[in-house]
Amino acid sequence: MAIDHERLDRVINPKSVAVVGDSQKNDFRWLNHMKTFKGKVYSVHINPETAKRIEEELKVPNFKSLKDIPDDIDYVIFNVPRKVAPSVLQDAAEKEVGGVAMFTSGFAETDTEEGSSLQNAIIDIAKTNGLIVIGPNCMGVYNSKRGLRFLDHPVGNSKGITLISQSGSIASSFITAAEARDIPLGKAVSFGNGVVLENPDYLEYFAQDKETQFIAMYIEGVRDGKRFFDVLKKTTPIKPVLIWKSGLTDAGQRATASHTNSLAGSRSIWEAVCKQSGAIQVNSLEESMDILTTLNTLDGFTGTKVGLAGGAGGQSVVMADDFTNAGFEVPALTKESNEKLGSFFSLVGAAYPNPIDMGSNRKEIETVLETLMEDNNIDFVTMQFSASKNIEDQERAEFSMQLLTEHRKRLQKPIASIVFSPDPNATEQNIIKDMLKKYQIPSFPTYQRASIALKKVSDYYKFHTKQG
Amino acid sequence: MAIDHERLDRVINPKSVAVVGDSQKNDFRWLNHMKTFKGKVYSVHINPETAKRIEEELKVPNFKSLKDIPDDIDYVIFNVPRKVAPSVLQDAAEKEVGGVAMFTSGFAETDTEEGSSLQNAIIDIAKTNGLIVIGPNCMGVYNSKRGLRFLDHPVGNSKGITLISQSGSIASSFITAAEARDIPLGKAVSFGNGVVLENPDYLEYFAQDKETQFIAMYIEGVRDGKRFFDVLKKTTPIKPVLIWKSGLTDAGQRATASHTNSLAGSRSIWEAVCKQSGAIQVNSLEESMDILTTLNTLDGFTGTKVGLAGGAGGQSVVMADDFTNAGFEVPALTKESNEKLGSFFSLVGAAYPNPIDMGSNRKEIETVLETLMEDNNIDFVTMQFSASKNIEDQERAEFSMQLLTEHRKRLQKPIASIVFSPDPNATEQNIIKDMLKKYQIPSFPTYQRASIALKKVSDYYKFHTKQG
């Protein structure tokens, strides 16, 4: 059905919320999560004892039906037995709420006749009334600016990345992961079985949402592949779209069926969809974070010839391998660069390899970085900051970052970094990462992850530069 | 040349050490690192002022020449100007030391005539005198039990993993990484250009070393490919050998040439070498750690049909995909298992998917784990421990681990785990990891890393079961 974007706006940016059927058993999780919501919160519960606790302990006004609430309701989240779902939806439709998210599960994904028939009833009510239904079997809407959330997540961001996810647990991990990396994730929709609105509907909506800069999608399946492809093709030239498609193996497809009852589709089709539409295909949460970090700090980056600085000895070899394997060129430096480095290091005529070791004093660092940034064979520069060395001498680390950003500004050449630590629990490296953030230099924990993320973003911008 | 293993024994497990040419400029790093050495330490320095500081401040007896030391010397590490190297080596040969590690660099890897000619002089002296020379351009020997080290690394382990590395910086990262993960790394050799002893020599020696359980190699190149392959084929049936081969791209080969002057070889040759010899090919430090963790906790593991527990919703789908992509089967459960779960959860006739959600109370956990472990379709079980949930209820986490280990003992079925946390800085998950260590259950941070490491180890044991 055609989605009424004005009505969906009410759901995604609600001013009032009703929680239907929150239970004592789960410590009123839905009402508790609404404590951060910047707007009015109402409860609907028919059990008098529960209703009393909600009113007295949680101080939330409770009503026996949605229709009794003496206020407009933009967003309803409900957790009622599946059999009751249609009648609550009917109330919501008559009340003319913005929309409903159904946490309730037990529909077609259970492979039972009752589940399927109830699911059909939901679809009928939604279509007849033009009611926006998110789910069932989902967590609904997260809107950081509005303080609307479905788990104990932080709120406050006003814009940036929007996540469209069929899975609530993946959505929750995604929000936590982004928060930990200072990636501004402003909005998320977890929509489970997606029986009324599905992937292309959300994509189409967020493509035109002014607060959404990039879109990340976790997809288990789509019903109307053609429509999804059409919407995707229209969206990627405006905003980068990451697609994390799961259920691409037999076992994954079986798991998908019992999770969101989606048809998963084949790997080759999904690869073609991403390639032909210029979407960015990702394979994991970590890769999503790496790419969002890159998008968030490197604008319009299309370089394929990388200059690598700062790896010593074997690290240089591994660094060169990893960037080449990701699809980059790691070219030799120009004659001019070799001469400049040769005369400075008093080894005239010597060839300086790429990757290039940084040396340790400031004059050396300055010479190496300037030469690398100015080299005509090099499109962009990636520097390794060994966590341990740079924490010992933070001034030197900051000196390198200042130099890099000055050259970036002067030469319009992008830069990136790797903050490597063999000990994954060494939180000291966060000091270096925070310094890099200050200079808006994207950082990655390994060469492999850096090279793959940088390449995918570079490919994205190249695709749309050619098309546009 | 044929390597005298008795003499190499002296070098790898020295009772006495001489440091030649340690300098004030680097704060006597070599002598300072020897502070943990369980044996006698001597210094050789010809500058009277430096010698005085070494004797008075560091309390290390100093001599003008190796030959003046009134004691047998098992291991010499030296850091002298390259021109002086041959004469120091000559002294070492006449003194009949066990062997020498040359930190000194600037030989064939610099691509100069002088470097190459000095390198030839070193080779001549070594061959004429049967002198063991490690390097040049290397960090030498790390022996944890003897307290012998080349950087500020911990010491104390007595056995376990031995690392053979052409790169000193990779060796150092490897030792730190293993320490952080409680992987017992007892010995390492960093041998740089390897002009006298090279890869197969070290491999042959450690193949017969009783304290070495597994061997990890970081290789930039080998000179005698045939001999390396022969030694490797003989070693892998006795001990697992990990091979991390770098320099497999053009840029990596260029970096290799200027690092250790090695001939890197092609990717297809190295893949064939590993496949035909039953060695375990790895591509990064992280992967090495994952595989060593697996080897260290799962003995003789050959399963390919995995039962997955504990992922909820979308996590199940991703888990199933990742294990399938790594080459595992994620089979449906037997009829008996489905009936058992169906009667317990009162959904007779329902099909329970694999991956299977754990439920939350103890009776549920017990039923699910017992059924999965006993299922005849399943060779081994991997359980996800969500870091946040299990930290909230550590008793429940411990209950699951106890159950798993009891079934493991009873059924002789291996188990593994994933401790997932979307926040990479959430050190709380170390609580769960420590509990898992107590039960000797290997743990991994992502499905992808778990599945790849488990598959490679399973392949290793299967290869050698078939051969043997």
Image (spheres, coloured by chain):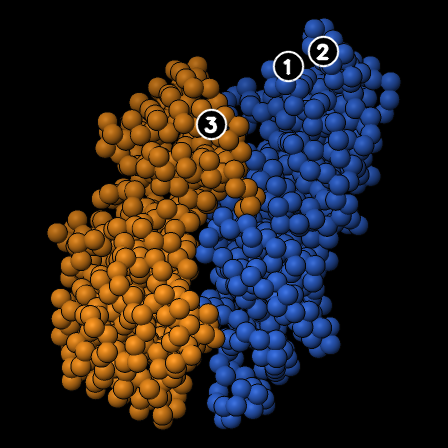
Chain colours: A orange, B blue
Is B435 placed above or below A354 here?
below
Tell me residue B221's x, y (percent): 55, 42
> In the depicted view, which residue is nearer to us: A233 or B259?
A233
- The reply to whether callout 1 and callout 2 are in contact (CB within 8 Å) is yes
Residue A410 position, x and y percent, is 24, 27
Q: Secondary structure at mark 2?
A: helix
- Residue B93 visible from this viewpoint: no
Residue placed under numbered mark 3 in the picture: A394
Q: Which sits in the foreground, B234 or B247?
A: B247
Residue found at x 40% / y 85%: A110
Residue B53 is labelled as 2
Q: Nearer the viewer, mark 2 or mark 3?
A: 3
Judge from the rendering whether residue B72 lies leftward or rightward of residue B205; answer left or right.
right
**Which residue is depicted at the point 48% across and 87% down?**
B351
SS type, badge 3:
helix
Label 1 and label 3: CA atoms lie apart by: 24 Å
Going by the numbered disc 1, the residue's amino acid type is Gln
Count of picture labels: 3
For the residues labelled 2 and 3, the Cα–Cα distance comes to 30 Å
Check the image and report above or below for A128 versus B48.
Answer: below
Check residue B24 in the rendering and tell me which mark sits there, or answer none: 1
Residue shown at the point (60%, 58%) measured from the top left:
B432
